């Protein structure tokens, strides 16, 4: 979910202010929700990627699986963009300061990669634990940005899945953790769709 920070920070609305300055916070949130549909294509992409992570354990050497865990997460955002194009959803809302905030919130995930590499080098069996906890925790601000309890479920579901399954069932972590995360993301997509129907903007 790492967005193009240069595009975001160079936006004229970000640099100089724009028409959004006269809008209320509620207006901005509602516009962002309508435009991005609460970012559900990213979660849908995550479902696909983590299902692939689950299956590749059975067909690839464990060394390859571990490396793919580190760098394969980078596929979630471009796949999410592709899905959003198919569904007619815009995820790159640089004309809305809350959209910019969402991108800034997602961007620090790039700095997690050195942590993942160290874990891979020292205690690779804990990669699902580490990646699940850090990736899951970054969803927390979207509870407020999108006015969405679904993201609370995604945050807690992902983090607790990684903590319990990745921390206490280490021998099975490379299968049960990604499977659990894909299920959590899938339920999150369903919950977001319900929110959009109950509270149309």
Image (cartoon, helix red, strand yellow):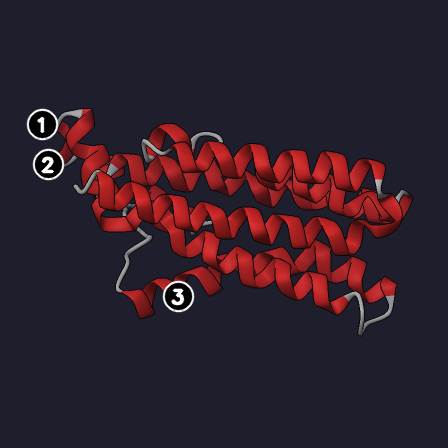
* Residue found 10% across the figure and 36% down from its top: 19
User: In the picture, which quadrant includes the C terminus?
Assistant: top left
Q: Position of residue 196 (x, y in %)?
A: 26, 44
Asked whether residue 3 appears in the rendered view, the answer is yes
Q: Residues within 10 Å of mark 1 (few under 14, many from 20)?
A: few
User: Viewer-nearest of labels 2 and 3?
Assistant: 3
Measured in 3D between alpha carbons, the distance from the residue under mark 1 to the one under mark 3, in whole angstroms, is 33 Å
From the image, tell me which residue sits under label 1.
22
Measured in 3D between alpha carbons, the distance from the residue under mark 2 to the one under mark 3, in whole angstroms, is 29 Å
Up the image or down, 87 lies above or below 44; here it is: below
Measured in 3D between alpha carbons, the distance from the residue under mark 2 to the one under mark 1, in whole angstroms, is 6 Å
Q: Position of residue 162 (x, y in %)?
A: 70, 40
Marks 2 and 3, the one that precedes in the sequence = 2
From the image, tell me which residue sits under label 2.
19
The residue nearer to you, when weighing 18 against 195, is: 195
Asked whether residue 1 appears in the rendered view, the answer is no
Q: Residues within 10 Å of mark 3 (few under 14, many from 20)?
A: some
Query: Left of 171 or right of it: where is 132?
Result: left
Q: Are marks 2 and 1 in contact (CB under 8 Å)?
A: yes
Up the image or down, 60 lies above or below 154; here it is: below
Q: Secondary structure at mark 1?
A: helix
* Residue found 21% across the figure and 46% down from its top: 34
* Residue found 57% across the figure and 42% down from its top: 109
* Residue found 62% across the figure and 58% down from its top: 50
User: Viewer-nearest of labels 1 and 3?
Assistant: 3
From the image, tell me which residue sits under label 3.
83
């Amino acid at each position: 979910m790492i967005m193009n920070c240069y595009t975001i920070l160079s936006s004229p609305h970000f640099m100089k202010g724009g028409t959004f300055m006269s809008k209320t916070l509620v207006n901005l949130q509602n516009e962002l929700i309508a435009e991005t549909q609460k970012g559900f294509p990213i979660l849908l992409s995550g479902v696909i990627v983590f299902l692939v992570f689950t299956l590749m354990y059975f067909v690839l050497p464990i060394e390859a699986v571990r490396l793919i865990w580190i760098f394969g997460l980078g596929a979630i955002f471009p796949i999410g963009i592709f899905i959003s194009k198919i569904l007619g959803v815009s995820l790159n809302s640089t004309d809305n300061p809350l959209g910019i905030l969402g991108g800034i919130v997602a961007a620090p995930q790039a700095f997690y990669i050195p942590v993942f590499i160290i874990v891979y080098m020292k205690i690779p069996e804990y990669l699902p634990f580490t990646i699940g906890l850090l990736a899951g925790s970054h969803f927390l601000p979207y509870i407020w940005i999108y006015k969405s309890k679904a993201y609370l479920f995604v945050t807690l579901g992902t983090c607790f899945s990684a903590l319990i399954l990745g921390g206490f069932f280490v021998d099975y972590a490379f299968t049960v953790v990604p499977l659990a995360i894909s299920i959590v993301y899938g339920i999150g997509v369903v919950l977001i769709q319900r929110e959009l129907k109950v509270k149309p903007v």
